[in-house]
Image (cartoon, helix red, strand yellow):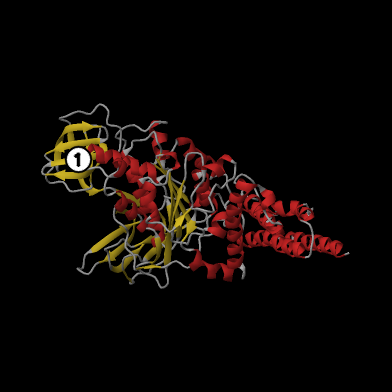
Amino acid sequence: MPQGTIVKVAGPLIVADNMGDARMYDVVRVSKKRLVGEIIELRGSRASIQVYEETSGLGPGEPVESTGAPLSVELGPGLIESIFDGIQRPLTAIRSIAGDRIPRGVDVPSLDREKVWGFVPVAQVGDAIGPGDVLGTVQESAVVEHRIMVPHGISGTVRWLHSGAAKVTDTVCRLALADGSELPLSMLQRWPVRRGRPYAEKIAPTSPMVTGQRVIDTFFPVAGGGVAAVPGPFGSGKTVVQHQLAKWADADIIVYVGCGERGNEMTDVLMEFPELHDPRTGESLMKRTVLIANTSDMPVAAREASIYTGITIAEYYRDMGYKVAIMADSTSRWAEALREMSGRLEEMPGEEGYPAYLSSRIAEFYERAGLVRCLVGEGRQGAITAIGAVSPPGGDISEPVSQATLRIVKVFWGLSASLAYKRHFPAIDWLQSYSLYADNLGRWFNDNAATDWSQLRAAALRALQEEAELEEIVRLVGVDALSWKDRLTMEAARSIREDYLHQNAFDEIDTYTSLQKQCRMLRLILAYQTRGRAALDAGVDLAPILALPVREAIGRAKYIPEDDLKRFDAVESELVAQMAALMDEEAR
């Protein structure tokens, strides 16, 4: 393997000479400490290397050895419930060996080589199989069946299959190849993180990823296999939104990437997820979660790798036919790592110092998401839904990372500092946010949630937009200048904001709302507005309409348990009776 020597050290960037035989994106081992690095630029025999570990103490003359292989992740049983760093080093295993601090140059296999799994064969001896075909299954956790697939680029006839206990490196299948040779296959695969895994066809998504968050599901839904961004200033709730999506989203597998954020946020995930019971399976949420932690106190260069590590693991489970959701928190920190490395490479800077290729790198990440037809298997489909948090400085989404992201994603959940200061969470601004999937998903919602879903959504959005326009008038001339109908519209919009869109992530009942309950809640608020207008037309004063006792029940409808939705009928009957009583009294 090519071996060179260090000629320059600039923070996480190392320049090595005599590397003429190396290739771009090869992994190298730097110095006698054998630090992990990756070649990111080649000029003649000189290689620029980004090092994924602390480089203090290194100097010119120390050796650099190329491994001859690109940065890759290990794929196989043992990914679920694990926590890795940005280059897929298992943090739990490292802690048991070296304590609370990761020592430099530590070399621990990503997947446990000693753990024994129960391999159940699916293929049969004599079967002709190719890339993506399932050889057998392993029960990786209580809720995830891991499908052991034939690696890409390999085809042959099954000559022998194992059944029973096996480690990830044990041979579970022997294939007879076309040239007559025999190839042993284990449960372990490796895949370069910067190369997307192949699939047969990408399909336009037609169903949503239901999240249980009312402002998202009702107003700005994301499709299963779609891409979304959550930009917002510090303290506006980006991380909590992503935690909520990871907890409750309609996905089989969750890949959560903490990229450059504070360590206490990943600590929250580690503390909460094992304690949370998944409503879909009844098991702990960690039983279907992979965590990648590359927090702000870890080497900056590894942030870039962490995003690719996460999406590669997500693609692997998508190949099995699973619905995967990947949360990246946050892509701004990843972009800052790109900017730092670009500056040290002395590249021509783009806007605000970011590299000129920022947009293409962000696009490469999001384009690896999607709903696909897998390479093999009749009707086998898988999906990756990618949701990236963006942390623009000062909340200014005109900065390059936000703008590059918005050109790619189809859902924009814009978080508002003013809503966060008012303690309105999730602080998603309903006037600025949008979903380009909403029209395509409308038919699915009408068929599977409620036949009048599209009408309810349109009526609620119209009320909120009218409220914003009326507030301008109120600020200029006061509320007395409005007609009673306009004041009723503002009151209904306030009920939508406070009783429907405001959702308590820490309340046992309010943290998740099914589509059926969302429909019932919205229908109740809009029924109050419609019947209130009818009462005004009948001559009833505004004051008694606003003071109806049933309004408290409408406001507390969010706390009605999912298994007791019949209580909505009682509240609706009460609303009808009280409105009728007002109109009867006016008639008399």
Question: Which residue is outermost to the right?
Answer: 588
Picture coordinates of residue 472 (x, y %)? Answer: 58, 50
Instruction: Check the image and name the residue furthest to the top.
Output: 57
Identified by mark 1, the residue type is Ser
Q: Is residue 162 visible?
A: no
Judge left or right: residue 505 versus residue 73: right
Q: Nearer the viewer, residue 554 or 482?
A: 482
Number of residue marks: 1
Q: Nearer the viewer, residue 319 or 140?
A: 319
Quadrant in the picture for the N terminus: top left
How many C-alpha atoms fall within 10 Å of the one at disc 1: few (<14), some, or many (≥20)?
Answer: many
The secondary structure type at the circle numbered 1 is: strand
Residue 431 horizontal/vertical position (percent): 53, 53
Please identify the quarter of the rendering in which residue 514 is found: bottom right
Vertical order, 21 against 34 (above or below): below
Residue depicted at 38% across the width and 41% down the height: 333
Residue 570 in view (yes/no)? yes
Q: Position of residue 368 (x, y in %)?
A: 35, 58
Q: Is residue 199 above or below residue 492?
A: below
Front residue of 123 and 103: 103
Q: Is residue 412 left or right of residue 460?
A: left
Of the 4 image quadrants, the one containing the C terminus is bottom right
Q: Which residue is mark 1?
A: 48
Name the side, left or right, on which 364 lies relative to 449.
left
Residue 11 against residue 501 in the figure, above or below? above
- Counting from the top left corner in percent of width and height, residue 275 is at 57, 44
